[in-house]
Amino acid sequence: MEYRRLGNSGLRVSALGLGTNAFGKRADDPTSIRIIHAALDQGINFIDTANIYAGTESERIIGQALTGRRENAVLATKAGLPRHEGPNGRGSSRYHLQQELEHSLRRLQTDYVDLYQIHTFDPHTPLDETLRTLDDMVTSGKVRYIGASNYAAWELMKALGTSELKGYVRYISTQTSYSLADRTPELELVPMCLDQGVGIIPYFPLAGGILTGKYNGEAGVPSGSRADTDPAFNRFLLEHNIKLGEQISEKASAYGCSPSVLSLAWLLARPAVSTVIVGATSTEQLEHNLASLDMKLSDDMISELDQLSDSFRHGKPFATYRLD
């Protein structure tokens, strides 16, 4: 397994991380636990979850799976997106974050989180309040490092500037949608992260499965796929996305690999990327994606993929999650 520094911090994370959004939803408890154990056995140490995944079930399952193996994992969770409809049920206020951290710790059966991430920028809470709260969490020992998610480049830069000005702990990473189907981070976020030493953690690296080729052709939505189990995902099945998936499949065939492996290998080679979150609903899927670590793309191959996906540097991001 290849390990990389998360941003400019001393924390080392596996180049492929395990995404757990499907745990407790598209993967039941026994399957999810097998996947976590298989990931740890293969050297994957970065496990990413959130307090809202599968209605908190993802955190609960991870807590069970890490019993006796907690020290093998760099455990990351998030808070900030809506948890409930109450007046303080969302956002990054001190009230909400402290409450949600305690709940996450109980579900995860641990007394600390390695990386605590703000799930999205909160325009209704002063950054100073959020960052001071996170600083206190690190001082308390309940959190070791902090990260952002779904921040625009200017929002992240403002947070880093506030931390520097006030002497607060600093974001070491940011999560963003990033893939061949979404290269919008390259316009502003990637240069900013390279300049400031912030590690990028791409989510949706396979565009929710579009880059695996499963939605190619006229066969419709495969049974058990994300689009099948989550009808809201169908908003991503746009013509230009499907066409890109078909083109990537053709390239992968010519290169002698799967489109998933090719797409992940391209992303792993991008500047500022520290670890790529890859979800799995079976151990076989996890094993397949691990092959991307052994695939080294030539300059010509990278250039071809860059040209093929150049239009995806512009326009709207593939996905982003924001507070109203």
Image: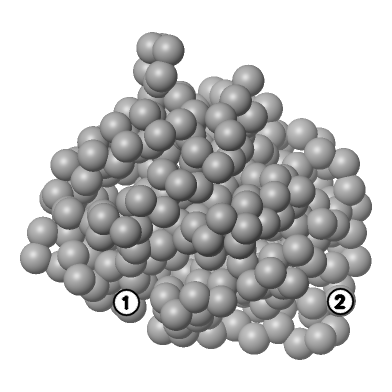
**Is residue 138 among the parts visible in the rendering?**
yes
Label 1: state its secondary structure: loop
| Marker count (numbered) | 2
What numbered label is drawn on residue 292? none
Q: Residue at x 28, y 67 (%)?
A: 73
The front one of 256 and 272 is: 272
Residue 265 position in % (x across, y down)? 63, 74
Q: Amino acid at mark 2?
A: Ser
Crowding at dot 2, Cα within 10 Å, few <14 / some 14-19 / many 20+, comes out as few
Say which quarter of the image contains residue 180.
bottom right
The front one of 213 and 1 is: 1
Say which quarter of the image contains residue 126.
top right
Residue 220 position in % (x across, y down)? 63, 33
Crowding at dot 1, Cα within 10 Å, few <14 / some 14-19 / many 20+, comes out as few
Q: Quadrant of the N terminus?
A: bottom left
Residue under pointer 2? 303
- Image-based side of 166 in relation to 33, left or right: right
- Image-based side of 280 in relation to 143, left or right: right
Residue 292 vertical position relative to residue 238 in the rendered view, above or below: below
Q: Residue at x 60, y 83 (%)?
A: 295
Residue 286 vertical position relative to residue 120 in the rendered view, above or below: below
Residue under pointer 1? 42
Label 2: state its secondary structure: helix
**Is residue 279 among the parts visible in the rendering?**
no
Name the residue furthest front: 166
The front one of 289 and 4 is: 4
Q: Residue at x 14, y 49 (%)?
A: 109
Residue 319 position in % (x across, y down)? 67, 39
